[in-house]
Image: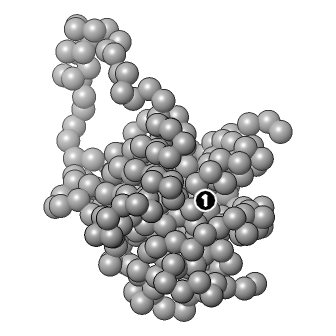
Amino acid sequence: MANPTIKDRRPPVTPAGQGKGAWLGTLEQGANLLQETTPLRGFDVYVVGFHCAKGRPEMQMEAHHYCRVVNDDLLQCVIFDGNTRDANLIGIEYIVSERVFDPLPEEEKDYWHPHNYEVLSGQLAAPGLPDAAEKAFLRLLLNSYGKTWHTWHTGRHDGEPGTDLPRGEPTLMWSFNRDGECDESLEQDRNTTMNLDTQTKHEQRRSFVDLAHPQRGVDTMADDFTDTTPIPGVVDVRHRGGATD
């Protein structure tokens, strides 16, 4: 299968300030725009999903992750509000395997959100990868955890305004863990613009359900939402009953 085309997703806000001629002029004099950028090399794994602020279910946004695979247990990601050259840097995420997460102190674990719903629901996508390659990559994220801080809420693509500069303290983000937690308009807007099909991806990943382990944090924000539905394979470690189709 040919490599699918990645659909452009422009940022929802234009930052404060004007022009960049002075910066470019200085760089051209000193290095002809060929400065060494070694730490940024390798941030070429691209996935897009959604985040909400921990304890603040109304604060939701699209998150475009560009990640570097450090090893089989750790990914480091920078997060943008789009995938074009003018996208704004809005946060960072560290992703660890279950093997690395389990021995962490209990108080540290409170900062890390589970990933099984994002994978199994089909919400998390790797645009540009053929279906088989995307499925294989997302399988590696099953049972993993993420520690995510957003430094800038630039708003939502479906219309909610953000700020034109980063303001206030960094915000600890969380994952969605049930159908109905992510605003339907937010998800639909992304899917329409980027030609993504969450339901099809959900069906393609059903074979992962038996591989999914109960995770810490699935129920952390359960009471912050109403009219939600659990999906098979997404279970909090505190009650292993699970959901059925």
Above/below status of 166 relative to 18: below
Q: Position of residue 179 (x, y in %)?
A: 59, 79
Residue drawn where x is 31% and y is 57% of the image: 149
Q: Position of residue 198 (x, y in %)?
A: 67, 65
Q: Position of residue 214 (x, y in %)?
A: 57, 74
- Identify which amino acid the numbered label 1 is placed on: Leu
Q: Position of residue 2 (x, y in %)?
A: 79, 36
Closer-to-camera residue (200/26): 200
Residue drawn where x is 23% and y is 59% of the image: 170
Location of mark 1 (residue): 142
Q: Secondary structure at mark 1?
A: loop
Above/below status of 80 relative to 209: above
Residue drawn where x is 69% and y is 42% of the image: 129
Image quarter for residue 111? bottom left
Closer-to-camera residue (219/91): 219
Relative placement, left or right, of 234 versus 163 is right
- Residue furthest left in the image: 168
